[in-house]
Image (cartoon, rainbow, N blue to C red):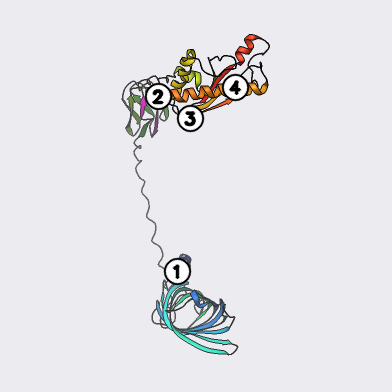
Amino acid sequence: MNKTLMTLVAGSLMAASSVAIAGNKGGQFSVSPVIGGITFEGDMKLETAPLFGGRLGYNFTDALGIEALFDYAKTKSEANQATLDFYRYGGDLLYHFMPENKLVPFFAIGYGGMKFNEVAPNIVSDRTKGVFDYGIGAKYFVTEDVAWRADVRHLVNRDHQAVEYTIGLYIPIGGAPPVARLADPPPAPAPVAKPLPAPPPPAPLVTLTASPASITRGETSTLTWNSQHATTCDIQPDVGSVMPNGSKVVSPEKDTMYAAICKGEGGAAKSTASVKVVAPPPPPAPVAKPVVSAAAVRFCNKPAILMINFDTDKYNIKPQYHDELKTVGDFLIEFPKAKGEIAGHTDSTHTRAYNQKLSERRANSVKEYIIKNFGIDPGRITSKGYGEDKPIATNKTKEGKAKNRRIVANFTCD
């Protein structure tokens, strides 16, 4: 973060530089009182504090100089709130960029000592360590005899790091007096312009495009053209004379190369665009409809009444109904994931309790016949008797009672 901050400050200072009569001068001594702040980093756990200091400098050249420095700050420990006096002393080597300008940015690097005097109840200790520093700054010369200055320094030793940031005055002392700048010579008289010959008319320009560039026979493409310095345009084949700028929809039967020729006072220009024509795809083959078996139509996902009759008060299955039950067995073999219920129903001839038992016996008799004779997994079929509770016709007539005495298969197919 510190390097990014110093980079941004340096860029801003360079961008703001402007040439002026003041600047950094070789052979000058300088005094700089400064004020600012210091932020301690890492595991030092010290609070940011105000900082006061001074600089004594000497410029070897306009660009290269040296400064002795002294800084002081009073801070506190974040761990135990102990008060610490911070001192820094040392020297920096400064290199100035554009020293002749009013705003003079510079880079600094140096070495010195960093000392803490810690004051707390029953504790007094001095700690001094060597410290490197580097950073950037700038001097802004208000006059030749005084300038504002701003500095940022990154302090680094093996154990700790900190950032100092200060502003102050830069007061140069001594040095060679400024050399008076000679007046610029008067400008040379402007040459008398000779009349130029009239330029030749510009040559025409034209661009021709086709969108889309590939079509299926029977579809269309749009030709678009734009020209400059042209008075007439012609597009071939099959289009003819057109305005200098425009578009036209075409539908060629085969691959066609179109050419636009535009003419003007400066000559003629040509541009081409091709349209590729492909044959339409063959019609899709008819989709075969799935063949649905008669068993699926009869039994899948809907109730189906089995054509079985029982003798009065009986639940054994007569041989003449074996073919009807075979249709159920064949269906369950054809659809191995089908499962469901065999439901038994009666009329109301006997008592409700009797009819309930009779319907359960008849439904179970059909279920067991299918399981035994067709090898069906018993887990796929259940049986249930409904007695006289679900009539589909009246029980007041012989015909209605016959309809109500029934076996119903209810299967679901995945």
**The residue tagged with tag 4: helix, strand or loop?**
helix
> How many angstroms separate mark 2 from mark 1 (CA)?
62 Å
Q: Is residue 127 left or right of residue 26?
A: right
Label 3 near label 4: C-beta < 8 Å? Answer: no
Q: Earlier in the sequence, mark 4 or mark 3?
A: 4
Name the kind of residue labelled 4 in the image. Ser
> Which residue is depicted at the point 38% across and 61% down?
188
Q: Which residue is mark 3?
A: 378
Can I make out residue 385 in this image? yes
Q: Which residue is mark 2?
A: 220
Q: Which residue is mark 4?
A: 359
> How many angstroms separate mark 2 from mark 3 (CA)?
66 Å
Q: Is residue 347 left or right of residue 235?
A: right
Residue 63 part of the magenta segment: no
Q: Which residue is mark 1?
A: 3
Q: Is residue 244 above or below residue 393?
A: below
Name the kind of residue labelled 1 in the image. Lys
- Which-is-in-front pick, marks 2 and 1? 1
Name the kind of residue labelled 2 in the image. Thr
> Which residue is depicted at the point 64% across and 9% down?
398
- Which-is-in-front pick, marks 3 and 1? 3
Q: Main secondary structure of the magenta part?
A: strand
Q: How many marks?
A: 4
> How many angstroms separate mark 4 from mark 2 (CA)?
74 Å
Residue 215 part of the magenta segment: yes
Task: Give the extent of the magenta segment.
Answer: 211-229
